[in-house]
Image: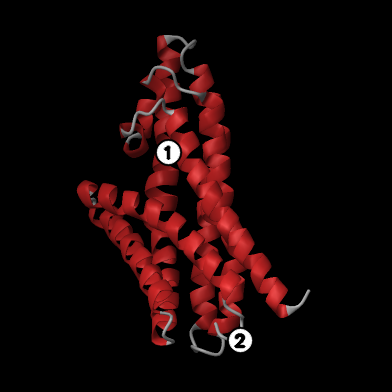
């Protein structure tokens, strides 16, 4: 595969990642029966009427591929370009890879745990419901609070901010600013986790979720249009 065809393939994969991330949002809404509060407080899923277990499971599968794994090609493509732009290219790429792997592992965990507990909860005895609720809370706290909104967000912020600054300095102004902006809200979400600022977490997380989709779509189209030698 020629260099230009490789770049175009990466662009297509990145656009697909954006579409799957959007599918994650849509199936997530269907899964929790459009209870928006359940995104910030997953425990509400157990008591929300009309929860769609299959949609909730697919939401996490789409999350695993859309927000994370399908970004691997563009991370490596940017790494090849960053090697000639910064002595920190390896560290920048490491943060991108760490973001993807941390996030994907969390989504994979929830794709297994959610269907089991959500299905078992309604028919369980009161005593067992308390156990299931405690387990559900623990797993969600580990993934949402620890893996995603704390550790992952600092990896993501470092990758997006660093790559964005270098893109901007090379006069790719729109992509550079979009990349930097995405990184800023990742950093804000990570800081909210450290300082336990619930309002900042909710604001930064919701903006990140949409910006990550827009960024993947934008850079995918960008890579389809510009030859690698110009990038």
- Residue 50 figure quarter: top left
Question: Which one is in front in this view, the residue at disc 2 or the one at disc 1?
Answer: 2
- Of 212 and 217, nearer the camera is 217
Tell me which label, 2 or 1, sits earlier in the chain: 1
- Of 179 and 38, nearer the camera is 179
Vertical order, 107 against 167 (above or below): above
Q: Secondary structure at mark 2?
A: loop
- Which disc number belongs to residue 221? none
- Of 174 and 136, nearer the camera is 174
Q: Residue at image x 71%, y 73%?
A: 5
Where the N terminus falls, by quadrant? bottom right
Looking at the picture, how far across and down is residue 146, in whole percent? 40, 50
Residues under labels 2 and 1: Cα distance? 44 Å
Q: Residue at image x 41%, y 25%?
A: 33
Residue that label 1 marks: 140
Side of 97 relative to 43 (left or right) = right
Looking at the picture, how far across and down is residue 121, in whole percent? 47, 17
Residue 109 visible at all: no
- Residue 44 figure quarter: top left
Please tell me how crowded label 1 is: few (under 14), some (14-19), or many (20+) other residues with Cα within 10 Å.
many
Q: Residue at image x 46%, y 35%?
A: 28
Q: Secondary structure at mark 1?
A: helix
Vertical order, 154 against 80 (above or below): above
- Which disc number belongs to residue 229? 2
Residue, far right: 1
Looking at the picture, how far across and down is residue 168, in whole percent? 39, 81
Looking at the picture, how far across and down is residue 167, in whole percent? 44, 80
Total numbered labels: 2
Give the colour scheme shown. secondary structure
Side of 186 relative to 58 (left or right) = left
Please tell me how crowded label 2 is: few (under 14), some (14-19), or many (20+) other residues with Cα within 10 Å.
few
């Amino acid at each position: 595969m020629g260099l230009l065809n490789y770049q175009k393939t990466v662009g297509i994969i990145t656009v697909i990642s954006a579409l799957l991330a959007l599918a994650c949002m849509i199936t997530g809404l269907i899964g929790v029966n459009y209870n928006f509060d359940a995104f910030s407080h997953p425990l509400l899923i157990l008591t929300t009427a009309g929860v769609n277990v299959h949609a909730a499971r697919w939401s996490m599968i789409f999350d695993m591929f859309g927000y994370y794994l399908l970004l691997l090609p563009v991370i490596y493509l940017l790494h090849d370009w960053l090697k000639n732009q910064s002595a920190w290219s390896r560290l920048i790429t490491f943060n991108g890879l760490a973001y993807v792997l941390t996030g994907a592992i969390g989504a994979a965990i929830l794709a297994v745990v959610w269907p089991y507990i959500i299905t078992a909860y309604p028919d369980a005895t009161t005593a067992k419901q308390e156990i299931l609720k405690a387990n559900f809370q623990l797993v969600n706290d580990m993934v949402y609070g620890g893996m995603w909104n704390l550790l992952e967000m600092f990896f993501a912020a470092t990758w997006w901010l660093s790559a964005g600054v270098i893109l901007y300095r090379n006069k790719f102004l729109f992509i550079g600013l979009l990349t930097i902006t995405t990184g800023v809200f990742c950093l804000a979400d990570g800081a909210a986790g450290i300082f336990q600022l619930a309002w900042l977490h909710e604001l930064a997380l919701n903006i990140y979720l949409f910006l990550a989709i827009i960024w993947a779509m934008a850079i995918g189209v960008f890579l389809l249009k510009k030859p690698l030698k110009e990038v």
